[in-house]
Amino acid sequence: GQCIDTKRPFQVSVSFPVNGQGKLEALQVTLTQEGKGCPLFAQVAGYEGNAELTEALRAGMTPVLSYWRSDDMLWMDGPGDDGKGTCKTDSDTCGPTTKFYNFSIADVGAPVLKAGPPPAPAASNRGTSKAQREQEGLDLLRPLFNGGATLDHQTIGGIQPVVKVLRCPGKLNVANVGDMQMVPAGWNTPSGGVNIDAGDNSVIPHMGGRAYFAQFCTPGSYRHEDYMAAQLLGKTLRYSVDLTGVGCGCNAALSLVAMRQNTNPSQCSDYYCDASAVC
């Protein structure tokens, strides 16, 4: 595109300016790209639900990253050739991953700050042999089973049992806020969830992956109190995104959800629920 080429990384700024009474005044989105001199700007102002949005934002929001595909996305990305849209069909093959990085939260109008360097890895005294690592993984999983299941190295009927490994994807630094853990959806599914990589100030969702910003991450455990409650009134949320390989019918999204305040685990058992009632 003339202003934003979505085949190259670009920057997203989402601002939540407030009026003199501290209430949400508008929602402003700006897209910029290095080497391009024409930022794209959109604003929603005067929305009749601003009072409710103000209270939700004041309570704090959890950023959610996801990457998925659908054959019913033309309401958003069509029609192309050329009804002034992008896609004629949602038949593209989606790339295996997408990337979000360089997150920051700052006062509206404040200078742009890049996220700091990733923290140095903590010292570890974990075992180095294969047997030691396997045993440590089993020890980690034991508390997640309520009797009836025994995890060890024995075979059953000559078949080595498959153990689902639950892990935290990693953490990233949000400038002006600090380190945030990523909590993946799907720990309660046969695959064990994850499908997300995090670290080096970036988050890489794999196709079908979804993850939540959190203060703490405990493998296999979802607690609504652990999720981030970002304070965004009067602030600007900034990040960069690389949509290379995200074609027609592919959706790479950052959403804001009131997960810290939600005491209903939902059908996903992780306290996630969006405007479309998708678990």
Image: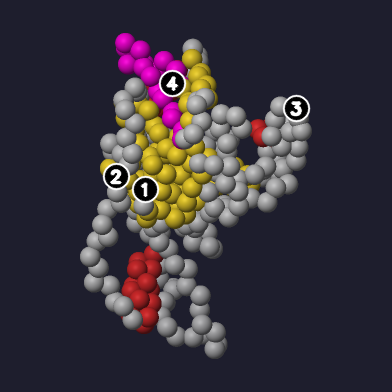
Residues at marks 3 and 2, CA–CA distance in whole angstroms: 43 Å
Q: Which residue was labeled with disc 2?
A: 116
User: Which x, y percent locates residue 226?
Assistant: 33, 46
Extreme residue in the front direction: 35
Q: Amino acid at mark 3?
A: Gly
Label 1 near label 2: C-beta < 8 Å?
yes
Residues at marks 2 and 4, CA–CA distance in whole angstroms: 34 Å
Q: Amino acid at mark 1?
A: Asn
Image height check: is 224 above or below 121?
Answer: above
Horizontal side of residue 156 vs 246, given as left or right: left
For this rendering, which residue is in front, 47 or 111? 111
User: What numbered label is drawn on residue 83?
Assistant: 3
Label 1 CA crowd tier, 10 Å (few <14, some 14–19, many 20+): many
Image height check: is 166 above or below 237?
Answer: below
Pointer 2 or 1: first along the chain: 2
Label 2 CA crowd tier, 10 Å (few <14, some 14–19, many 20+): some
Q: In which quadrant is the C terminus drawn?
A: top right
Q: Which residue was labeled with disc 4?
A: 52
